[in-house]
Amino acid sequence: MFAKLFVGFLVVVAVLAGYLWSNQAEIVANFNEQRSLEREQSQQAGRLFGEKNDQNACLTRTLADFDGCQEFGCSVSSGLFLKNCLAVAAPNSALCEGVPAFQDVPSEDDKHWAKYECIDRNIRGEACRMLMRQVSQFCSQ
C-alpha cells in the first residue's frame, strides 16, 4: 500500500515538475508583470498621499501599513510608498529631528537608532529598520 502511494506521489511530482519546466518562461513573465504592477501602484499611492499630507504623515502612514509585514514584497512596496510620498509631501522639520546622518555603511549607533525607532513605535517587521534608514537618507539630502 505504501509503495503504491509513494509511486503515485512521485508521478504527481514528476508531472508538476514537467509542467513548471515547460512553462517557466510564462510563469516568470507573469511574476515579473505582477511585481511591476505592484511597484507602480505603490509609487502612485505614495505620491497621491504625499500631495495631500506632510512628510511626517508619510512616515506614520507607511509604518502603519507596514506593521507586521514579514514578506519581501510588502517591504519593497512600503519603501516605494515612503520614497514617493516624501518627495512630494509638505516639509515637516519634525521628521528629521534626532535622525542620524546617513552613511553607506551604518554605524552601530545608526543601527541602534533604527532598531529602537521601530520598537518605540511598536512596529513589527524586520524591514522597519530599512524604512528608518530610508528616512535617514532622505533627511541627509
Image (tube, helix red, strand yellow):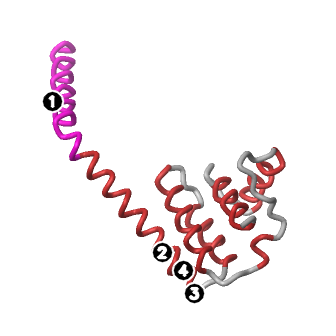
Give the spatial CA distance, label 1 vs label 4: 47 Å
The answer to which of marks 1 and 2 sits earlier in the sequence is 1
Q: Secondary structure at mark 2?
A: helix
Label 1–label 2 contact, CB within 8 A? no
Question: What amino acid is labelled 4 in the image?
Answer: Phe
Residue at left offset 50%, top offset 50%: 71
Reading the image, the residue beneath label 1 is 15
Q: Position of residue 30 (x, y in %)?
A: 26, 52
Label 2–label 4 contact, CB within 8 A? yes
Which numbered disc covers residue 45? 2
Residue depth check, mark 1 versus mark 2: number of the one nearer the observer: 2
Q: Secondary structure at mark 1?
A: helix
**51 on left or right of 129:** left
Image quadrant in which you'd find residue 99: bottom right
- Which range is magenta? 1-26
Question: What amino acid is labelled 1 in the image?
Answer: Val
Quarter of the figure with the C terminus:
bottom right
Reading the image, the residue beneath label 4 is 49
Question: What amino acid is labelled 2 in the image?
Answer: Ala
Give the spatial CA distance, label 2 vs label 3: 11 Å
Question: What amino acid is labelled 3 in the image?
Answer: Lys
Please state which of residues 24 and 88 is positioned toward the viewer in this rendering.
88
Residue depth check, mark 1 versus mark 3: number of the one nearer the observer: 3
Reading the image, the residue beneath label 3 is 52
